[in-house]
Image (cartoon, rainbow, N blue to C red):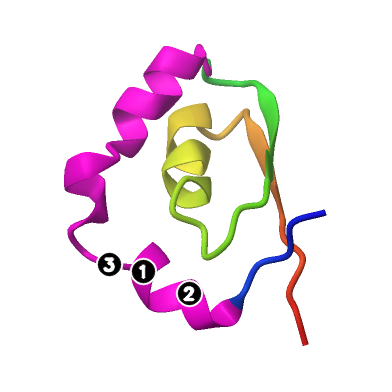
Amino acid sequence: MYKFDPRKRDFLDDPRRPFFENPDAILSEAGVKPGQVVADIGCGTGFLTIPLARHLGEKGKVNGLVAVTK
């Protein structure tokens, strides 16, 4: 099982990341629709989780699941 390594946070939160991994394009391609209930498994620092919540709207729900190493 993969576990999130907090030492990689800087890479995951890099402000340039949305330019080469566009969250809106990813969610659109995945077929995510407003109002759905979705699990973001392995969400790390929430790169897709926050845009996913916006995309789902008030009637949708997102659960972000992450395992952190000690």
Answer whether labels 1 and 2 touch (C-beta < 8 Å): yes
Q: Amino acid at mark 1?
A: Phe
Which residues, given as a range, are shown in magenta?
6-32
Q: Which residue is most to the right? A: 1
Horizontal side of residue 9 vs 3, given as left or right: left
Report the magenta stretch's main SS: helix
Crowding at mark 1 (Cα within 10 Å: few <14, some 14-19, many 20+): few
Element under label 1? helix
The label on residue 8 is 2
Q: Position of residue 41 (x, y in %)?
A: 70, 45
Q: Amino acid at mark 2?
A: Lys
Q: Pointer 1: what residue?
A: 11
Q: Pointer 3: what residue?
A: 14
Is residue 34 in the magenta section? no
Q: CA distance from mark 3 to mark 2?
A: 10 Å
Q: Which residue is most to the bottom? A: 70
Q: Amino acid at mark 3?
A: Asp
Q: Is residue 51 above or below residue 64?
A: above
Residue under the point 21% across and 42% down = 20
